[in-house]
Structure formats: structure tokens, C-alpha cells
Image (cartoon, rainbow, N blue to C red):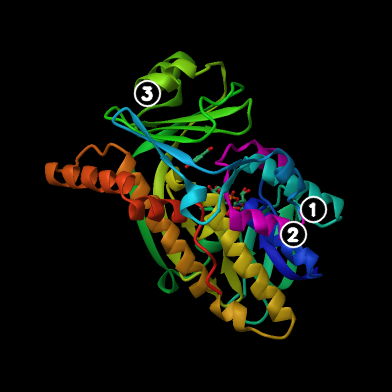
Amino acid sequence: MKVQVAIIGAGPSGLILGQLLAKAGIDAIILEAHTGEYVLGRIRAGVLEQVCVDLLDEAGVGARMHAQGLPHHGIELLVEGKRHRIDLHGLTGGKQVMVYGQTELTRDLMDARKAAGLTTVYEAKEVAISGFDGDHPTVSYVKDGIRHDIHCDFIAGCDGFHGVCRASVPKDSIRLFERIYPFGWLGLLSDTPPVCDELIYAKHPRGFALCSMRSRTRSRYYLQVPLSDKVDDWSDQRFWDELRLRLDAEARQSLVTGPALEKSIAPLRSFVAEPMRFGRLFLAGDAAHIVPPTGAKGLNLAASDVRFLGHALIEYYGGSSHGIDRYSERALRRVWKAERFSWWMTNLLHVFPDTLPFEQRALEAELDYVLHSHAGRTTLAENYVGLPFEE
Ligand code: APR
Ligand code: PHB
């Protein structure tokens, strides 16, 4: 079989890229290791930057997001029992974010792909890539016990952190940057109305907490927990009790609790692989970088990469290789700004087990500055809503 672009992975990166290429008439196939239901079953964040919203519109999949997503003009930071509103809209000249779950977004992308009759091979096993350092890359996979070969012009590695694409690059041509944090986030999803109209990021001596939402009737809450904790250590009751302890009196009062639909612990990690292009292989999304969830940048960075990559491939088939030659540099420039922001937000709002007294006071002073200076709040706001694309 021959296609122009072979996309590995049907997460948000692979699906958005597939949609952009299809709209431009470029022939692509997506190979996904798991089933569609499995991909949809993973609960992930759901705060979209305006540029991400615009990209989904460009890809032709924005209708349900506009109808059901919740535009947010601000976020709340809860520090020492006091709420501080960051007016995202006012501080950024009218920008906002859209709260819309990654699961819903993935479903919209899958539906659009299906409706257009585009090929996605689910449960593609033993996916292997080769020849990307020359002009004729090949992707091979096994489906229902039969091995298939795909000959293509380009491979898009959209296969997440544990995928095969980054792992197939020779060790001496890739540089990895990593920071592991000494705690995780315990998340709970429940069919209860959100405690507040806006997201609350809470810094508390017992640990960070986040009140988020998926809709007006479905909430998502998180607690900073030690990495040694197991989900089974946390009954629903214990979760709600601990969350209350980390909130302010107003939130404690209005918090509606209910049974958990899902509960899981995720470790926090910062990670970047450089470069993001190896001959005819491009990495995008979690395959190339991971951010801690504090800044809600994971999905947005995936979208930003495939925007650069999609446009670069369209340009290539239009006759210019300028875009693909600059892909890695352009993508990484934006990636590192979001990495810096996510790392900074994480440091600012979490309790670290071994912070030295001087560092502790310096961090407190920094947070005080961010909350009480116009410049500080503006910096937070413009990064949170998403930095503009530098073309
Ligand atoms: N072959 C085929 N598919 C694979 C392989 C493989 N060898 N390895 C992994 N995959 C698939 C995974 O099953 C997954 O569905 O690639 C997909 C990668 O999807 P994501 O992990 O969601 O990564 P990405 O599309 O880059 O999206 C990043 O998702 O993880 C969140 O917070 C992250 O919001 C961010 C976004
Ligand atoms: C979420 O809703 O899951 C969420 C929101 C904001 C974050 C992280 C996660 O910063």
C-alpha cells in the first residue's frame, strides 16, 4: 500500500493532523495500537486555548465544541485561604479559554474521520518504522495476524510518550530533557455541578488542589498526593474530606459531592525531545514532549505542533519544503515556552518535600508579586490563554 503520509497514533495529535491533511486533499492513513473505545476511555484535561479552538474550526470539527463547550474569561487562585481572580479576558485584550473535555474533542474528530470515509486502522500491532533517513520510509504493522507494509513520503509520529516513533530514532541524534516531580495528581470525575463557575487553583500547606469541570453537571477535581499513594488508599469520602480541607469556606459550603465516575493517579513530568524532525519522520504532541498538567498545556501543545506540521506538509505538496525544514525549530520554540510556564506554575503552587527555607520565602514572594502586580498577573494570563503563533 502507498500513501503520502502515515500517521502513527489516533490521539488528539494524530486525529487533528489527519483532519487538516484530508481537508487539503493529502492522502493519509492513521494506525492506532488500541481500539477507539480505549482511546475515548482515557480521561484527560480539557482547557483549550483560543488558537486551539481556531485550529479545530479550521479542521472543520468545531461545531459541537462551540455548542457545548464553556468559554472561561478568568481563573481563580486560592492562596492562604483567599481567592484572587486572574481576569484572563481583561489582561489579554479579550482572549479566553474554552473548557471542553479531551474525550469529547477526540470523539468529534473520530466521527468526522468516519463520516469522511478516511482510513484508521485500530488495533494495529507490532508497528515498526524504517527508512525515514532516506527518501522512502516504510511503516509495517500486523492486523488480525497479517503483516502489512505501507510505503509513504512522510511518517508523523503522533504516538504519545510511550510510542514507537521516538524510540526508533538513533540515540546519538536525539537529545532528551527531563524533570520528574516528587508527587502525583489524584483526579476524581463526578456527575456533580462544579463548585465554582471558574477553575480554582489552590495552594495549601497540605498540598495543591484544583477544581475543574467538564460541563455544568460534571466536575473534575484533583489533589496533590505523594507518589507512593495508591488509588485504593483513597475512598471517595476521603477524597472529598481532603479536598474540603484545601478549599476556602465559600467553596467548602457550596461543594456538592457524589460517587466517583473515575479516579486515577498521574505522575507529573516535564520532558522534551530535540529535535522534532529526523529526515522524513516528524514527532508531534506527547511523542515529543510532556508537561505537568498545572498549566493545562498538554493538549494545546499537541494542537500547536500539528498546526505547524499540517501547514508544512500542505506547503510541501504545494511545491515548497520551507515549512518542513523549519518545523522542528518553530514547534520547539513554542513548546519550550509552554514547558517553562507549566514548570513555573507547578513550582509556584505545589508543596515540595525538600524546599530550603530561603527558596520557600522566595517562592512566596514571587506568588505575592504575581497576584498583586499588574505585570505579574498579565504574564500568567497571556501564557494561560496561549501565546500567539510566531510565523
Ligand atoms: N502504534 C500505534 N499507535 C500507538 C503506538 C504504536 N506503537 N504507541 C502508542 N500509540 C497510540 C496510543 O494508543 C495513543 O492512542 O498513540 C496515541 C497517542 O495519543 P496521546 O497519548 O493522547 O498523545 P497525543 O495525541 O500527542 O495527545 C497529547 O493527550 O496525553 C494527552 O495530555 C496529553 O492532552 C495531551 C494530549
Ligand atoms: C482538567 O479539567 O482536567 C484540568 C484543567 C486544568 C488543568 C489541568 C487539568 O490545569
- Rendered residue at 86%/51% (across/down): 115
Tell me: 235 left or right of 34.
Answer: left
Residue matched to label 3:
248
Around disc 2, counting alpha carbons within 10 Å, would you say few (fewer than 14), some (14 to 19), or many (20 or more)?
many
Towards the viewer: 96 or 30: 96
**Please, what secondary structure does the residue beneath circle 2 have?**
helix
Q: Are marks 3 and 2 in contact (CB under 8 Å)?
A: no
Q: Residue at x 74, y 41 (%)?
A: 67
Q: CA distance from mark 3 to mark 2?
A: 44 Å
Residues at circles 1 and 2 in contact by the CB criterion of under 8 Å:
yes
What is the number of the mark on residue 19?
Answer: 2
- On the rendered image, what quadrant is the N terminus found in? bottom right
Q: Main secondary structure of the magenta part?
A: helix
Q: Position of residue 94 (x, y in %)?
A: 55, 53
- In the image, residue 281 sits, relative to residue 226, either above or below, namely below
Residue 229 pos. (x, y %): 37, 27
Residue at 68%, 45% in the rendered image:
105
Q: Decide which of tag 1 and tag 3 comes sooner along the chain.
A: 1
Amino acid found under the numbered disc labelled 2: Gln
Q: Using the rendered view, name the quadrant where residue 204 is placed.
A: top left
Residue 155 x %, y %: 65, 68
Identify which amino acid the numbered label 1 is placed on.
Arg
Residue 221 is inside the magenta segment: no
Extent of the magenta region: 36-60
Real-space CA distance between mark 1 and mark 2, rounded to the nearest whole angstrom? 7 Å
Residue 316's spot in the image, x, y percent? 69, 80
Residue ID for mark 1: 113
Vertical comparison of 85 with 309: above or below: above
Q: Earlier in the sequence, mark 3 or mark 2?
A: 2
